[in-house]
Image (cartoon, rainbow, N blue to C red):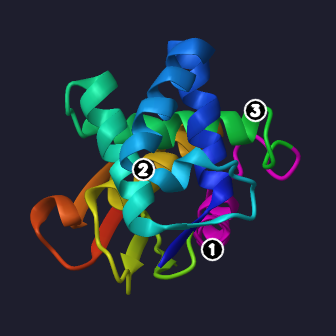
Amino acid sequence: MEVKGVAFLARQQMMAQSHGEATWKSFLTDFAKKEPFFANPIMPVTRMPVEAFLRLNEELLTRFYGGNQSAWWQFGIKSAEYALSQGQLKTMFSQGDLRRFLLFTPGIWKGYFTAGDLSVNPGQDSTDLSITNVPRPHVYFELSVMGFAHGGLNYLGAKNLSHQVIKGYTKGDKDVLYRFNVS
């Protein structure tokens, strides 16, 4: 499994905005000494080894967020807000496009990761999102991707937004299944 460079670039932009450019560059320089892959320029189409990408996100969590995994959920929320307000999804969705946004999320997964599946199962009162077939299951994938879905729904005007974790890497399961309830 590989992660596309666009995922790194999004994280880089977020970290530089929230912690400052100098702090980010210092962190990345230090991290590249442990993980040489990050000593080279990363382009949107660069394919990163999943292990290197996960180590980067684990180090970010330790260094900047006290090891609190809920930061990965916040990464997802912030990524959705950025994508919908000024990024690549800005012109694709309007307020209230909740169902269409959820149906589009498998394409977002494929835009970032070369393996695994994100699927959507819309129901009458809820929509299920599941992550399956990931060769390297990791809590990062669950929290950042489901956080993205939550953030996108919220940004697009979901009322009474809630979710249930049916299965998850956070629970020790081999797959992820979240049920999103919106009105």
Can you say whether 20 is above or below 2 in the image? Answer: above
Label 3, on which residue?
85
Tell me where residue 139 appears, x and y as whole percent: 27, 58
Give me the C-alpha separation between circle 1 and circle 2.
14 Å
Residue 167: say if magenta. Answer: no
Q: What type is the residue that disc 1 sits on?
A: Lys
Please tell me which of labels 1 and 3 falls first in the chain.
Answer: 3
Please name the amino acid that badge 3 sits on: Ser
Tag of residue 110: 1
The image shows residue 54, relative to residue 148, as above or below, that is below
Badge 2 or badge 3: first in the primary sequence: 3
Q: Quadrant of residue 134?
A: bottom left
Q: Is residue 170 left or right of residue 44?
A: left
Front in this rendered view, residue 136 or 70: 136
Residue type, numbered disc 2: Ser
Q: Earlier in the sequence, mark 1 or mark 2?
A: 1
Neighbourhood count class around disc 3 (C-alpha, 10 Å): few under 14, some 14–19, many 20 upward = some
Residue under pointer 2:
144
Q: Residues within 10 Å of mark 2 (few under 14, many from 20)?
A: many
Q: Position of residue 143 (x, y in %)?
A: 34, 51
Separation of disc 1 and disc 3 at Cα? Answer: 21 Å
The majority secondary structure of the magenta stretch comes to helix
Question: Start and end of the magenta stretch?
Answer: 91-112
Secondary structure, mark 2, is helix
Vertical position of residue 81 compared to residue 37: above or below: above
The residue at the point 41 percent across, 38 percent down is 31
Q: Between marks 2 and 3, how big is the CA–CA gap?
A: 18 Å
